[in-house]
Amino acid sequence: MKVPLIDKFGRAITYLRVSVTDRCDFRCVYCMVENMKFLPKKDLLTLEELDRLCSTFVSLGVQKLRITGGEPLVRRNVMNFFNGMARHLESGALKELTLTTNGSQLERFSKELYAAGIRRVNVSLDTLSEEKFARVTRWGRLSQVLRGIDAAQNAGLRIKINAVALKGFNQDELLTLTEWCAEGGMDLTWIEVMPMGEMGSEGRIGQYWSLRELRDTLDDHYTLVDLVERTGGPARYVRLEETGQKIGFITPLTHNFCESCNRVRLTCTGELYMCLGQEDMADLRLPLRKFPFSQEPLEAAIHDAIKLKPKGHDFDYSRQRVAGQMSRHMSHTGG
Ligand code: SAM
Ligand code: SF4
């Protein structure tokens, strides 16, 4: 029996988010600049290396894997990776394998994802207007994503929609998005936009819309029932009595519930970030590549990294300070 991953504050690390690529077929204005420079291919972990790393985490007690990016489904041969992880679901070591996607490739991959044991997928979608969708994603087409969502549901995948709350952009769609999700049997989670300094501002997109304000507006139209459930992350949930649907609010900066944080994040180059709000990271690519036939150095590096997990982030909550502190791209650490 291996020693499980418990940090120095007694928190068991059971949830790993893995960015399998920093590349994407969209260029969302709050996430990337249009002429984004991506990492050289040689820096990326191969799918075999990602498999080995994730399997090591599973052997150390990680029970939930969320695959993200960049856009995870644009990574070449990514299904080989998902199919590999399926063995940990089959053995029972892994309780859930899931992904966060922009939905553009779901039409192509949904059946295979279901066959690999995936049951739930988060799809990021900020607007139901074709014109606004093209504006916010720069390169995306709404119809393609909607077809992807249909295909996923037909394949048996349960979908949750993630929308970034953007003042003056999708504020007027709060009710239409809620209703559309209710009709499709989908939960909806709102994400507080994190201002990224070098992102440039495209028109008015990217302005901060407080989730408190959003919640108050929702409260004027529905009966909100607070749910006690926690996922160990920065999300809080309510149920809308009228539709039965779950609505989430992700406020990574203002409420982090750090005391119950159960997660760490792995980048596609093998850097392990112990906290979204801190710069501390451990390079796991080094022991991975240096000791291809021995697990001990890798396991020791992971244990050492977990010991460094900070008690919590220490963001200053004033927007200006936060903006100054976010130097990493979301597509690097994996949103
Ligand atoms: N490409 C996939 C997608 O869009 O779902 C997965 C990666 S993306 C970085 C993960 C999530 O991060 C998405 O829901 C996206 O909306 C969110 N995101 C990206 N930049 C953000 C920002 N500046 N503030 C808040 N959320 C952001
Ligand atoms: Fe791509 Fe997702 Fe970032 Fe949009 S949010 S640019 S879809 S990685």
Image (tube, grey):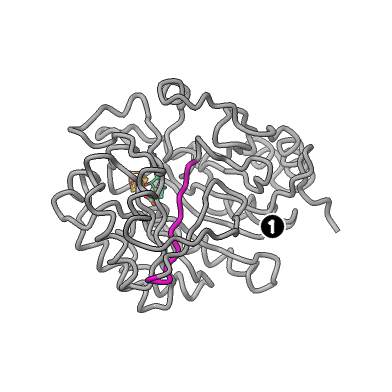
How far across and down, in percent of the image, does residue 129 sit?
17, 55
Tell me how many marks there are: 1
* In the foreground, 116 or 61: 61
Q: Nearer the viewer, residue 20 or 226?
A: 226
Question: Is 180 one of the magenta-colored residues?
Answer: no
The picture quadrant where one finds residue 264 is top right
Q: Position of residue 13 (x, y in %)?
A: 70, 49
Write the residue at 43% across / 69% down: 241
Q: Is 18 located above or below residue 305 in the figure?
A: below
Which residue position is annotated with label 1? 58
What segment carries the magenta color?
A: 242-251
Determine crowd level at label 1: few under 14, some 14-19, many 20+ residues with C-alpha closer than 10 A. Answer: many
- Residue 111 as seen in the image, left or right of residue 333: left
Residue lying furthest left: 131
Disc 1 secondary structure class: helix
Q: Residue at x 51, y 62 (%)?
A: 98
The extreme right residue here reads 1
Residue drawn at (29%, 49%) of the image: 25
Q: Position of residue 35 (x, y in %)?
A: 26, 32
Q: Quadrant of ligand 1?
A: top left
Quick one: quadrant of the N terminus? bottom right
Residue under the point 48% across and 42% down: 251
Q: Position of residue 69 (x, y in %)?
A: 44, 47
Q: Identity of the amino acid at label 1?
A: Val
Q: Hey, which quadrant is residue 48 in on the image?
A: bottom right
- Using residue 306 as the reference point, say whether residue 238 is left or right of it: left
On screen, residue 180 above or below 288: below
